[in-house]
Image: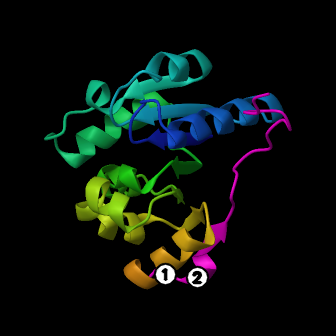
């Protein structure tokens, strides 16, 4: 079972990639998949059509006790997930909370310094301390994690595209 975490559901590249990953996994595996969005957006209904999806604020109080918040998450998920896949560094605000579940966290790093400063600056310590493995979308992102956040290089896999894409996808004539 996998809990996918998206920082939001707007019309962005990370969100499109997550939709592709979930669709691919559903077509090729028997994994139990649920999606936790930290905020809404234009793609929320698309997420809900393909997987059991909930907004964090609809599930737990931002100020409630950690134990109560974890109980709500595990009740919705149906137990503890086998893996938590965080779709960007911008999910950092929930890494400490989700780390309390005891499930391994895999974080897909797509951001460099400017985006981290805008979306995850205050949360990078939690991201690094609670992530067991990183996927970097490029060597530059890997190098940024190593240099600026002291992530061990052997804890990072560089994977430019997360799932196979049809050869003609995105081409225009």
Where's residue 123, x and y in %? 28, 61
Question: Residue 153 shows which numbered tag?
Answer: 2
Image quarter of the C terminus: top right
Q: Name the residue under label 1.
A: 146
Above or below, comparing residue 8 to residue 58 in the picture = below
Image quarter of the N terminus: top right
Residue at the extreme right of the image, as rendered? 167
Residue at the spot x=39%, y=57% of the render? 99
Magenta region: which residues? Answer: 150-173
| Colour treatment of the image | rainbow
Q: First in sequence: mark 1 or mark 2?
A: 1
SS for dot 1: helix
* Number of numbered labels in the structure image: 2
User: What kind of secondary structure does the magenta stretch mostly adopt?
Assistant: loop
Q: Is residue 24 magenta?
A: no
Name the image quarter holding residue 74.
top left
Label 1: how many Cα within 10 Å (few below 14, some 14–19, many 20+) = some
Above or below, comparing residue 68 to residue 66 in the picture = above
Residue at the spot x=36%, y=56% of the render? 95
Question: Residue 7 shows which numbered tag?
Answer: none
Q: Is residue 91 visible?
A: yes
């Amino acid at each position: 079972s996998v809990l996918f975490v998206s920082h939001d559901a707007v019309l962005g590249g990370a969100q499109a990639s997550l939709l592709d990953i979930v669709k691919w996994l559903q077509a090729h595996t028997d994994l139990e998949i649920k999606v936790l969005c930290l905020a809404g957006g234009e793609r929320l209904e698309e997420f809900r059509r393909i997987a059991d999806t909930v907004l964090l604020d609809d599930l737990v109080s931002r100020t409630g006790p950690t134990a109560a918040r974890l109980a709500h998450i595990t009740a919705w998920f149906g137990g503890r997930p086998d893996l938590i896949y965080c779709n960007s560094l911008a999910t950092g605000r929930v890494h400490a909370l989700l780390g309390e579940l005891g499930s391994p966290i895999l974080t897909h790093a797509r951001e460099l310094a400017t985006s981290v400063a805008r979306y995850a600056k205050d949360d990078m310590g939690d991201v690094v301390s609670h992530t067991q493995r990183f996927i970097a979308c490029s060597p530059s992102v890997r190098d940024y994690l190593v240099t600026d956040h002291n992530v061990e290089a052997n804890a990072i896999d560089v994977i430019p595209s997360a799932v196979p894409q049809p050869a003609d996808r995105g081409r225009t004539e």
